[in-house]
Amino acid sequence: MKKIKLFSALVLAGSLFVACSDDDDSTPEIVNEEEIITTVTVTLSPEDDGTDVTLQLQDLDGDGSGEPVYTVSGSLVANMVYDGSIVLLNETESPAEDITEEVEEESDEHQFFYTVESGLDLTTEYANFDGDGNPLGTEFTLTTGEASSGTLTFTLRHEPTKPNDGTLADAGGETDVEAMFSVEIE
């Protein structure tokens, strides 16, 4: 009789040992996968008659060894107002996935920042916003001043502090993509 009780106790203890698992080793489920952005296209359309200017960054291998390709279709005209729009694509898929839609759907978690080098005479202003009235920036207005040249950088931040003072330092968050273009105003 003692052998049966001892055997039962061992079986019970063994089943408890097997039933317990170490949940600390499990990898947390990814709630929102990071977007792959291979192509950034900024289109600047003059509010008056004129020719669109397109700025494009294309990095088809993402973080691979290939260098990104920057193209600028032409110069901006001095003292002109342009309507700007930004399109983000993942061209590792076929057909290419439009990441802009996802960024706009999650507008409370994203914001574009426009950084203008000091020698370049232009200003930017946000034209679209999230549900709380904070800037999103996939649409904007760009106003040129006098002839000049320099860099214009577009940075998309994920989960920035909103509202912020309009600077990357105050916004925090993580950079999803950064595209720096050499721009000339004639």
Image: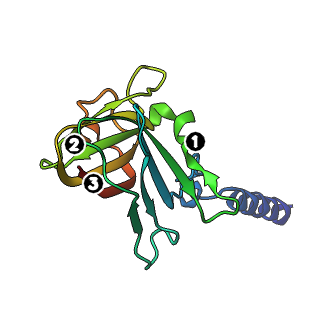
**Residue farthest left in this picture:** 119
Q: Which mark is residue 102?
A: 1
- Secondary structure beneath dot 1 equals helix
**Residue farthest front in this picture:** 49
Residues at discs 1 and 3 in contact (Cβ within 8 Å): no
Real-space Cα distance between discs 1 and 3?
28 Å
Q: Which mark is residue 183?
A: 3
Left or right, 19 with respect to 32, comes to right
In the image, 162 versus 126, the foreground residue is 126
Q: Position of residue 12 (x, y in %)?
A: 77, 57
Q: Position of residue 62 (x, y in %)?
A: 48, 68
Q: How many marks?
A: 3
Residue with the mark numbered 2: 169
| Above-or-below relation of 29 to 94 | above
Left or right, 12 with respect to 145, comes to right
Q: Position of residue 51 (x, y in %)?
A: 43, 45
For the residue marked with disc 3, what is the amino acid? Val
Q: Earlier in the sequence, mark 1 or mark 3?
A: 1
Query: Which image quarter holds the N terminus?
Result: bottom right
Residues at discs 2 and 1 in contact (Cβ within 8 Å): no
Left or right, 43 with respect to 15, comes to left
For the residue marked with disc 1, what is the amino acid? Glu
For the residue marked with disc 2, what is the amino acid? Ala
Q: Earlier in the sequence, mark 2 or mark 1?
A: 1
Residue appearing at x 71%, y 62% in the figure? 18
